[in-house]
Amino acid sequence: MITVVDNGSTDGSIGTIAGRYPDIRLLPLGSNHGFTGGIAAGVARSPARNVIFLNNDATPEPGWLQAMLRAIDDAPEDVMSVGGKIVDLSGKLIDFVGGLMTFDGHAFQNGFRYPVGSRQEPAQGAELLFACGGNMISRREPLLAVGGFDDDYFAYLEDVDFGWRSWIAGYRVTYEAGAIVRHASAATSVRLGDFERGVLFERNALQTVLKNYESDMLNNVAGSIFLTYLHRLHHYATERNTETKELTRPPLSANNSHRPGLWSRLRQRVRGRKPLAVIDDPLTAMQFRAFEWIVRNADRIASKRDRVQQLRKRSDLEIFARFPLHIVPTYPGDETLMQSALFRLFRPSAPSTQKTLIEIMRS
């Protein structure tokens, strides 16, 4: 039985599928629940032993399915998921052959957009912190037992979160080099727009670390996480907006511009008070919107965190001994922050390594 989850389409897909393929089980969600919501709905109704995830903008190469099935069937019982290899549409550039996670919950694809063969690829069956959700296979029962992909993510970093939770719960993730797909990177996600995607990236990174770090580790790394977030927010607010002098004025310094005369006071009564500062940059607004979601959903995140920690069978120190956390200057101003004495005071004590973005990937 084939199940098609319709994630709020508006192009007549439901009618077309129902008319042409009456044997297909159709599950219309009514609205767009994102990648994570669509996956959750489909997996919950699937009786299959294994579940394969393949992006709609990815094309498998010959032998892909056989390689995936063989890898999961031959894997030890503690292997939750197997991730395949992803290249660009030409087959010449790396898209995904493993990834890394930063201390604050962001993640990168190792060797992204470097030529195939130019970077060290994981050995067949090697362990990964996470598989890419665009080309992976998972055992359905343990996937459901650890909660699957988190519905609150909508899209982005949900596979990183799922991989980390898999390791926390005592499972492993491995690599299958023979399961290759060609991927038109961002062919679907670009429709969301850069700023909407940015909100998802930022809030999902924060969700990931707040849910998954064990208590001692979270207490250790929280300072560096929130210092970094505040530094980025400050940089955007003061460098990318036009009316922000009041945000950087030293305390008790003269501020003659805000001592209105009679005409200005009369005008204020008619038009209202002139704002002290103006946020007119969408990247700055993106950072605020991401943190707004975290604040409004704090209790929900704490509840999910409890469920994650109840499943814990492996410590974060053991996980990060395998997959060190990364410190990667990514945003404007990051390099200055991460070289500062203050950041060094907050640097996580867990196994970590510092790299530049170009060492990891090409934009």
Image (spheres, rainbow, N blue to C red):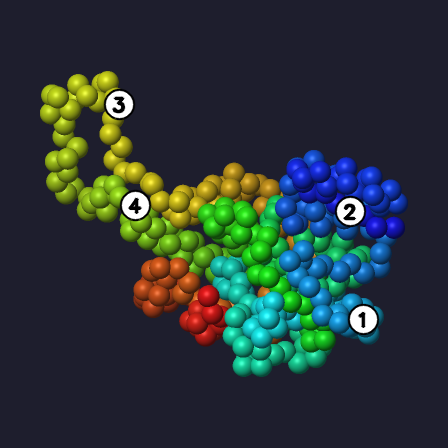
Q: What residue is shown with label 2?
A: 4
Q: Residue at x 60, y 42 (%)?
A: 300
Residue 241 is tagged as: 4
- Residue depth check, mark 3 versus mark 2: number of the one nearer the observer: 2
**Which image quarter: residue 171?**
bottom right
Quarter location, residue 336? bottom left
Using the image, determine if residue 353 lies above or below residue 286.
below
- Mark 3 = which residue? 272
Residue 313 percent location from the top left of the image: 70, 63
Between the C-alphas of marks 3 and 4, the distance is: 21 Å
Q: Label 2: how many residues lie within 10 Å, few (<14), some (14-19) or many (20+)? A: some
Mark 4 falls on what kind of element? loop
Q: Amino acid at mark 3?
A: Gly
Residue denoted by label 1:
66
Label 1: state its secondary structure.
Answer: helix
Q: Which numbered disc, 4 or 1, marks the residue that appears first in the sequence?
A: 1
**Point 65% across, 42% down: residue:** 33
Distance (Cα) linking label 2 and label 4: 45 Å
- Label 3 and label 2: CA atoms lie apart by 54 Å
* Percent position of residue 163, x then y: 65, 62
Which element type, helix, strand or loop, lies under badge 3? loop
199 vs 314: above or below: above
> Could you give the CA–CA distance between mark 1 and mark 2, rounded to whole angstroms?
23 Å
Task: Please tell me which of labels 3 and 4 falls first in the chain.
Answer: 4
Q: Position of residue 26 (x, y in %)?
A: 80, 42
Residue nearest the observer in this picture, 305 or 42: 42
